[in-house]
Image (tube, rainbow, N blue to C red):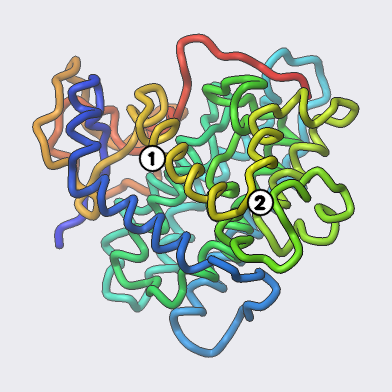
Amino acid sequence: MTFRVPVRAIRTVTDLNHFKQSPTYKELMTFIRLCNDAVMGVRASSLQLDTPDTAMDTVSRIVRMLRQMGSWVDDIPPIDEPMRFGNKAFRSWYQRLEQEAGGMVDTLLEGTGHEAAAVELVPYLLVSFGHPSRIDYGTGHETSFVVWLCCLFKLGSLTKEDLAPAILQVFYSYLQVMRRLQSVYMLEPAGSHGVWGLDDYHCLPFLWGSAQLIDHPSIKPHDVLDDNVLDEGKHDYLYLGAIDFIKSLKKGAAFGECCPMLNDISQLPSWKKVNTGMQRLYEGDVLGKMPVIQHFLFGSLLPCTWEPSPAPAVNPVAVSSFGGRAPWAKGAPAPPDVHTLGAAKATSANTQPTRQHTST
């Protein structure tokens, strides 16, 4: 396979409809459902990290990589001055990500026979951590990280047996990094529906987290309102961890007032119903919404299979979000599309024309 810098291809509602009928859409949803099935009834602490087999070692290396990214926050403290939206120190953190991502992915792919795939994997990884100019983050960025995992799965670096640890260890570690970035740098919610949305930043912890709790002997949907249950289970169950994080951000406000949608969901009779609803919500509110999915990137691993709508021609060279050729793209073949800004420039993930902000 010849790998290439992934580019945007969803520019109109017609493109979106083509995407929803495409093999790439089906492949991504199949991966998400496989992950859902893999974690069903699985408690995170029941998994072992750093086992001798090669596949699990991939998981271990990604976890270490994510922990290293999180440690950069200690080196780059927030700027201590009034700022209306987000802390500009995040841009310095992101610049470090741009500088280090290529080497990290190269190390991850070393010896796999797929080293050339870095040209596709690095852009997806970069988009996964928010937008450095707007200093925001949302479900489009989260989806980019899942696409990154899906590409590793398609390359064989992750196998079907790895999917439970990939979600409960790798994705969990990713959430830990993002929560720290959100808290320290005050990232704005990208395209948030405000109080009437599921969550300001994430969707998948609720999808896969509800799968974990299906047929749980004691924890029921209404138990998410119990702080003791959250405290005991937040490290084992993604859903409980997500609720706990929301409550930590919105202290002093009644859960039913700041999160009416999640509060209503807690009244459902079973986790299976919650999980089914979350799958529909993800397809409708994330993959089916133009403001979010218009920034989806297509390469060779997850290709665009239709003729995308035209856009003003620009130089199709992979560039840094801050201008200039991205360091990871040196020597990379330019994508054939002339209507793209290139991979890293496409880090604009999911905004809407008008953004609502919630009080934290």
Q: Pick the residue in front: 24 or 63.
A: 24
In the rendered image, which residue does mark 1 sit on?
326
Position of residue 24 in the picture relative to residue 86 (left or right) = left
Image quarter for residue 94? top right
How far from the left and from the top, in percent, is residue 261? 64, 30
Give the foreground label among 2 and 1: 2
The CA distance from mark 2 to mark 1 is 36 Å
Position of residue 76 in the picture relative to residue 321 (left or right) = right
In the rendered image, which residue does mark 2 sit on?
239
Q: Residue type at mark 1? A: Ala
How many labels, in total? 2
Q: Residue type at mark 2? A: Tyr
Image quarter for residue 90? top right
Position of residue 273 in the picture relative to residue 84 (left or right) = left
**Which numbered dot is residue 175?**
none
Mark 2: few, some, or many residues within 10 Å (few <14, many ≥20)?
many
Image quarter for residue 76? top right
Q: Residue furthest left?
A: 307
How far from the left and from the top, in percent, is residue 351? 47, 21
Q: Which quadrant is the C terminus positioned in?
A: top right
Q: Is residue 44 placed above or below 303 in the rendered structure?
A: below
